[in-house]
Image (spheres, grey):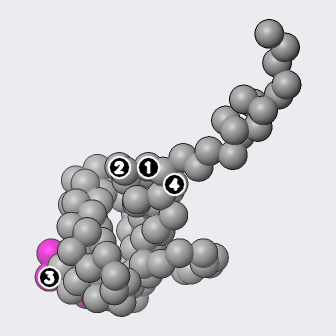
């Protein structure tokens, strides 16, 4: 049988959806990073239709656990450039195209 190339096209059109958190960048200590990832997963699953509430939930939990001045963005299709305290930044993807950015500045 001749290969008409359609199999390769179908493979190229597939979208990879990550069901686990994919950390793109982080300079946090390991314990803090693990806590942030767990908080993010919980909030994003609980408020899947409301990114604002997910961000507020993560921010409130981070403020209580690691002190004030935390900022959180949850959403799709955005870019960012922030100034932050060293060892206090986490950028991850969850559920495919949902991005979460957590950072601390004072």
Asked if disc 1 and disc 2 are in contact, CB closer than 8 Å, the reply is yes
* Residue 2 place in picture, x, y as percent: 84, 14
Q: Nearer the viewer, mark 3 or mark 4?
A: 4
- Per the rendering, the mark at residue 64 is 3
- Residue 40 position by quadrant: bottom left
Q: Nearer the viewer, mark 4 or mark 2?
A: 2
- Per the rendering, the mark at residue 20 is 2
Asked if disc 1 and disc 4 are in contact, CB closer than 8 Å, the reply is no
65 inside magenta stretch = yes
The residue drawn where x is 53% and y is 75% is 76
Chief secondary structure of the magenta portion? helix
The answer for how far apart the CA atoms under marks 4 and 2 are is 12 Å
Circle 1 residue: 18
* Residue 39 place in picture, x, y as percent: 22, 67
Give the mark nearer the N terminus: 3 vs 4: 4
Magenta highlight range:
64-68
Circle 4 residue: 24
Choose between 23 and 8: the one closer to the eye. 8
- Residue 41 position by quadrant: bottom left
Is disc 1 surrounded by few (<14), some (14 to 19) or many (20+) residues within 10 Å? few
- Residue 106 position by quadrant: bottom left
């Amino acid at each position: 049988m001749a290969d008409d190339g359609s199999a390769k096209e179908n493979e190229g059109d597939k979208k990879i959806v990550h069901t686990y958190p994919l950390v793109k960048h982080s300079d946090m200590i390991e314990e803090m990073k693990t806590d942030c990832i767990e908080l993010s997963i919980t909030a994003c699953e609980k408020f899947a239709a409301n990114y604002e509430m997910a961000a507020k939930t993560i921010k409130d939990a981070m403020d209580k656990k690691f002190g004030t001045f935390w900022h959180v963005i949850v959403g799709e299709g955005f870019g960012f450039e922030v100034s932050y305290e060293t060892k206090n930044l986490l950028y991850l993807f969850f559920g495919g195209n949902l991005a979460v950015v957590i950072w601390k500045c004072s």
